[in-house]
Image: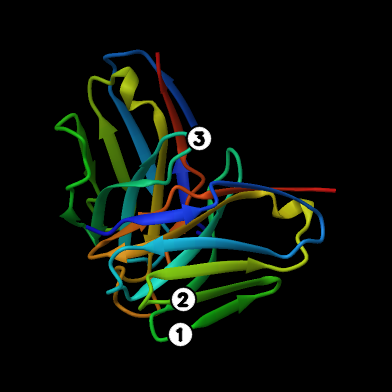
Amino acid sequence: KQEVTQIPAALSVPEGENLVLNCSFTDSAIYNLQWFRQDPGKGLTSLLLIQSSQREQTSGRLNASLDKSSGRSTLYIAASQPGDSATYLCAVPNTDKLIFGTGTRLQVFP
Amino acid sequence: GAGVSQSPRYKVTKRGQDVALRCDPISGHVSLYWYRQALGQGPEFLTYFNYEAQQDKSGLPNDRFSAERPEGSISTLTIQRTEQRDSAMYRCASSLAPPGQGRWTEAFFGQGTRLTVV
């Protein structure tokens, strides 16, 4: 059974810091991994999708890496801003569904 | 449409009433998923459609929950005889292809329906 864990559960940092959010999964036989952002009262926004053949994927200040063999992905946020405050979720496919972690709640203060 | 649309955004209902939640996926997206999310948790899978066929309903908690997608586009999640424990955020997502089938499997979520059963 695929299980997804995210560490830390919560993170509070001053503006400008570089951040690393961690995602671990138990079954390494995945096709891809997706990172989402969740804002209170709003939907999930897809940030990055990494295919299993890729090791990294970048979008602006975001960089996601994937190491299938060790069952890990990291989301790197450069030069964090207060607007980055949200909950970040990773998800991996398991047959026909996505399995989500419980998320990292990030707060970036000015 | 431009994104996944869910309605209503908020629903308050009395215990015992039936509710119907609607999802309008991105045009052309083959796959449609329903998830339920409790506060402080990640979304949990409920059911999945490929076109109009319900391929997997293993996540539906009991037989009070049902879903349909009769024409392979709009989907409705129905909860009969609602109970307080059904209160949650219900999320719908769509993708061009099912998970695990290559690059066109990125899932896009709607804003969700917040259901409160009183």
* Residue B23, position as x, y percentages in the image: 39, 46
Residue at x 37% of width, y 56% of height: A4
Residue at x 24% of width, y 57% of height: B49
Residue at image mark 3: B9
Mark 1 → mark 3, Cα distance in angstroms:
37 Å
Please check whether the numbered discs 1 and 3 fall on a single chain.
no
Mark 3 → mark 2, Cα distance in angstroms:
35 Å
Residue at image mark 2: A66
How many marks the image carries: the answer is 3
* Residue B99, position as x, y percentages in the image: 31, 68
Whether the residues at callouts 1 and 2 have beta carbons within 8 Å, the answer is: yes
- Mark linked to residue A54: 1
Whether the residues at callouts 1 and 3 have beta carbons within 8 Å, the answer is: no
| Numbered disc in front, either 3 or 2 | 2
- Mark linked to residue B33: none
| Residue type at tag 2 | Leu
Picture layout, residue A73 above or below residue A82: below
